[in-house]
Image (cartoon, grey):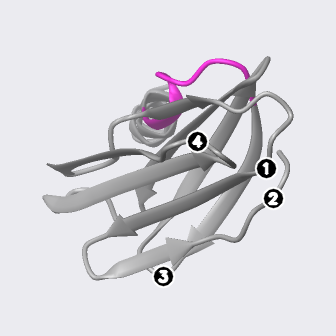
Amino acid sequence: MLIAASVLAVAVPGSAQAATAGSSCTGRKVRTLSFSTGSVLLYRDGGVVCAVTVQKRPGVNRLVSVSVQARGLVAVHKSRKDTRSSPVAKTYAGHRRVRVTAAVGSGSYRSGWFLC
């Protein structure tokens, strides 16, 4: 029983960390876009697209940013220095294509236009 409790204690922080990163985004997860220092999680709820960047190696205080843009609209850019993830960037996309950019420290990602 002691072994099971210690295994559970080790497993819970990681899953809590993953749940916290996307917890501000509602709807269903539609894509995960990975790059060298992190990944971008995309969620969709109706016509609203929500994006958050998560560090690949959490724990170090780095500049983490995310930007999401619906075609024909202005990009929504969010950034902060954090040990885990960026603030949430949301935009109404309707049935438009979107473009996502993200960065964690020196690594970055830029997508083309895509439907999600």
- How far is the residue under mark 2 from the one under mark 4? 15 Å
Give the mark toward the camera: 4 or 3: 4
Image position of 23 with respect to 53: above or below: above
Image position of 38 with respect to 92: above or below: below
Could you tell me residue 14's position as x and y percent? 45, 43
Q: Look at mark 1 in the image and give the residue it sits on.
A: 97
Q: Residues within 10 Å of mark 4 (few under 14, many from 20)?
A: few
Numbered tag placed on residue 36 in the rendering = 3
For this rendering, which residue is in front, 101 or 104?
A: 101
Q: Look at mark 2 in the image and give the residue it sits on.
A: 114
> Which of disc 1 and disc 2 is earlier in sequence?
1
Mark 2 element type: loop
- How far is the residue under mark 2 from the one under mark 1? 5 Å
Could you tell me residue 78's position as x and y percent? 32, 44
- How far is the residue under mark 3 from the one under mark 1? 25 Å
Circle 3: residue type: Ser
For this rendering, which residue is in front, 6 or 103?
A: 103
> Which of disc 1 and disc 3 is earlier in sequence?
3
Circle 1: residue type: Arg
- How far is the residue under mark 4 from the one under mark 3? 28 Å
- How far is the residue under mark 1 from the one under mark 4? 11 Å
Q: Which residues are magenta?
A: 21-28
Q: Is residue 51 in view?
A: yes
Q: Is residue 40 magenta?
A: no
Q: Is residue 4 in view?
A: no
Circle 2: residue type: Phe
Q: Residues within 10 Å of mark 1 (few under 14, many from 20)?
A: some
Give the mark toward the camera: 2 or 4: 4
> Which of disc 2 and disc 3 is earlier in sequence?
3
Give the mark toward the camera: 3 or 2: 2
Q: Look at mark 4 in the image and give the residue it sits on.
A: 73
